[in-house]
Image: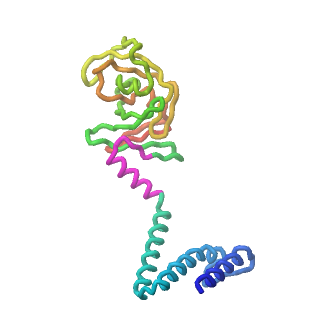
Amino acid sequence: MIFIGIALLVAAGIVLMISADAGSMIGLSQMQTAQLLPLVIILIIFAGGLFTRTHRFRELVGGLFMWAGLFAVAMVGYAYRDELTGIVGRVAGEIQPGVALVDTEGGTATFRRGMGGHFEVNATINGHTTPMVFDTGASAVVLTVRDAQEAGIDTDNLRYSVPVSTANGQGMAARVRLESIEVGGISRRNITAFVANAGALEQSLLGMTFLETLSRYSVTQNALELVD
């Protein structure tokens, strides 16, 4: 009997979808009624499975309410998907400050301020991802020796002849050119950078040779926004 009911519903759905004169049923348009049929079929199958196992009526009702609740949650989640994406991005940013909330349509990447008060960003340099600190005081992108090596740069043959000021004092750095650097979905190629000599820098810096290629960047109390 269950399969007969399903067959009748499927047939009715086909008629509604191909008929231009079907009008409306139970206050719904022909397309709305056709879209409702899959849910009705699922409920029929679910109810039939319960009855074939001789479950009690209240267990059937409980099961139907459970599926109806799941369906309602899914619909609400879909309707507010943009807002939920923003919330998930903010939570991820609080847990991992280097993770960006990316808006591909607007071409923006937003980072949350880290516990230490700095904005840490995950940058992919020559295909290798490394954490960096946003620093407008740095005139260029500056890499530690380790990050440079992991990005495929031969640090043994560099000339550390450029004086730089770091948190650890004065140091020397070597000029290099990065094949590619990507931050929060914003990609640039052939960017000038420096590699600080060993021990001069604790963490790589995202400086002005990358930042000046952006349309703009802005800092609020707890958020950094980069705009392609």
In this rendering, the answer to whether 75 lies above or below 112 is below
Q: Quadrant of residue 60?
A: bottom left
> How many labels, in total?
0
Q: Residue at x 33, y 18 (%)?
A: 197
Q: Residue at x 37, y 49 (%)?
A: 92
Q: Quadrant of the N terminus?
A: bottom right
Q: Is residue 202 left or right of residue 103?
A: left
Image location of residue 191, percent across then percent down: 48, 25
In this rendering, the answer to whether 75 lies above or below 197 is below
| Residue 166 lies in the magenta stretch | no
Q: Residue at x 54, y 81 (%)?
A: 44
Predominant secondary structure in magenta?
helix
Q: Residue at x 37, y 25 (%)?
A: 143
Image location of residue 66, percent across then percent down: 42, 76
Of residues 213 and 79, the one nearer the viewer is 79
Q: Is residue 90 left or right of residue 71?
A: left
Q: Which residues are magenta?
A: 82-101
Colour approach in the figure: rainbow
| Residue 94 lies in the magenta stretch | yes
Of residues 20 and 69, the one nearer the viewer is 69
Of residues 153 and 122, the one nearer the viewer is 153
Of residues 143 and 118, the one nearer the viewer is 143
In this rendering, the answer to whether 106 lies above or below 125 is below
Image location of residue 28, percent across then percent down: 61, 79
